[in-house]
Amino acid sequence: MQIRPILAAMRHHKAGTILIAFQIALTLAIVCNALFIIQQRVTRVMRPSGVDEANLFVITNDWADKSSLQNIGAQIKSDLIALKQLGTVQDAYATNSFPLRGHGWDNYVRLSPDQIHMTADASIFFADDHTLDTLGVKLAEGRNFTSDEVRDITATTSSPWPEVIITKALAQKAFPGGHAVGKPLYVTNDSTPSIVVGVTDALQSHMMDSDSTPYAYDAVLVPGHLLTTTTSYVIRARPGELAAAMREAKNALIAQSRMRIIDPKDGIMTYAQVRAKAYERDYGMAVLMGVVSAVLLAITAAGIVGLTSFWVGQRRRQIGIRRALGATRGDILSYFLTENAMIGAAGVIVGIVLALSINLWMVMRFEMARLSAIYILAASVILLLLGQGAVLAPAWRASRVSPVEATRPA
């Protein structure tokens, strides 16, 4: 075996050996955690919203005339009638917020008025009897709202809500193992409960912050049109007619009233755009972590190539002597590959300790999940294979050194 001569050679090149081992360790620690963060972000981005995203779009307008909330209520009703009459539109409703929006109303949900710790923090979506059909959401239990239950609501008259529809995720938290329909739920600070009349299938909340992940599918639908300075119309186009429906819906709303302001950038958005905007920070973080990992791996590979090439240049005479004594090209190649594998293994061991330490700090500081062993294993394999690949070219050049080098003066 070549272990003893390799160790002896390492002792003569301590600085270079330690430098490469530390570089491998640092790269491993960062790549492990970067891969873990990328996986978490990708998982968030791929979460289903529960709605018919392919055919949905949203028009949000600010009201130019804010003097009378009652006028806004009448205008919303006229707008919805006009939208539903369009041949390209399947259904529509007006709301304060919608899944993936990123902001809106949310309230603590409790099972009793004197409950200290909340059961959940749920998004509050104002809805009507057309909301479920517009979103393409099915009821898992109970019934939909009726038109008689939908009323105009202001910030001062918003509660209590006699009837609510909640998501399946919220129902499982509030009433584990049982049915939710017909049971009371406190979704405001008022001491009067709301009665659950329906439970939807999966429906994502509007909350997109990472600390809201436990409540990602907790939502409460309340019957009413919220009369505020801003109104969002969620519209479902007929299949294949999304672009036409978006044009016609905007024109229809403007024809109903020019006393509205539609932002030219974000006023009209497809649900694909809503999703992209909701997860733009997650996309950005995943790309950043990917770039950092790629750069670190490239720098590590370049360092291994450079240092090994330097060692080959320094050892040409020794390599020539070994060749003259009968060493084959395969022996020389094996020597450098083994040497690099030993340095890489030492770096990987130190890197694993660093990776776990960094993850422990992030768990304590940012409440992140603990690093899975599969990411440590994956990063270790990547670094070891990268090291062997990087050393292959200079090791191959070393194996080509002629025995004649042994006769040249040092």
Image: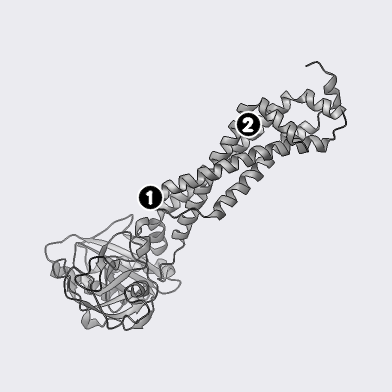
Residue type pointed to by label 2: Thr
Element on which disc 1 rests: helix
**Which residue sits at x=50%, y=55%?**
39
Percent position of residue 192, x then y: 17, 75
Identify the image quadrant of the C terminus: top right
**Which residue sits at x=53%, y=44%?**
353
Percent position of residue 253, x then y: 27, 67
**Which residue sits at x=80%, y=33%?**
399
Ranked by sequence position, the earlier of labels 2 and 1 is: 2
Who is closer to the viewer here, 350 or 236? 350
**Which residue sits at x=85%, y=29%?**
323
Residue, disc 1? 366
Q: Horizontal placement of 123 versus 348: left or right?
A: left
Q: Is residue 383 above or below residue 372?
A: above
The answer to whether residue 91 is visible is: no
Quadrant of the rendered image containing residue 148: bottom left
Who is closer to the viewer here, 197 or 33? 33
Who is closer to the viewer here, 71 or 251? 71
Residue, disc 2? 17
Q: For the residues marked 2 and 1, what is the alpha-carbon distance in whole angstroms?
A: 35 Å
Colouring used for the render: one colour
Who is closer to the viewer here, 309 or 362? 362
Q: Is residue 295 above or below residue 370?
A: above
